[in-house]
Image (cartoon, helix red, strand yellow):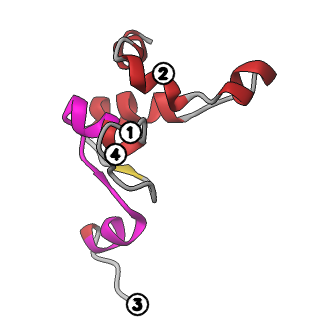
Amino acid sequence: MEYVAQIFRVPHFRQLIGVKQQLKGSPVADPFLVPRGALLGASVVTEEALKPNAAKLPNVCEHFGVRSTNVQGFLVEVGWRF
């Protein structure tokens, strides 16, 4: 939870939780994926793209030094072939 709090100390990363999700009280996993990746020394796998000044998983990962990749990159990384 301390790591999640660090993420939300960056003002624009608060947008990881949308307004509708806040109002409905819907569960949101994104803020917990980055700390989990950091804790395990693992990659966060997402199809979101890195965009300047965005509140996207790749941006949060980059900011906190956690590796992120997409599904295709993950499959290549673990040696899967099709």
Disc on res. 14? 2
Question: At label 1, which amino acid type do we have?
Answer: Ala
Q: Which residue position holds label 1? A: 54
- Mark 4–mark 3 Cα distance, whole angstroms, equals 26 Å
- Residue type at mark 2 is Arg
Mark 1 and mark 2 lie on one chain; the one further toward the N terminus is 2
Depth-wise, is mark 1 or mark 4 nearer the camera?
A: 1
Residue 27 image-quadrant placement:
top right
Gap in angstroms between the C-alphas marked 3 and 1 = 33 Å
Which of the marked residues, 3 or 1, is nearer the chain's N terminus? 1
Left or right: residue 21 compared with residue 43: right
Kind of residue at disc 4: Pro
Q: What span is in magenta?
A: 60-76
Residue 38 position within the rendered picture, expressed as x and y whole percent measured from the top left: 28, 32
- Tell me: 55 left or right of 18: left
- State which tag comes first along the sequence, 2 or 4: 2
Mark closest to the chain's N terminus, 2 or 3 = 2
Q: Which residue is mark 3?
A: 82
Q: Are marks 2 and 4 in contact (CB under 8 Å)?
A: no
Task: Evaluate if marks 1 and 4 touch, with contact meaning CB atoms under 8 Å apart.
Answer: no
Q: Nearer the viewer, mark 3 or mark 1?
A: 1
Q: Which residue is mark 4?
A: 58
Identify the residue at image location x=34%, y=45%: 58
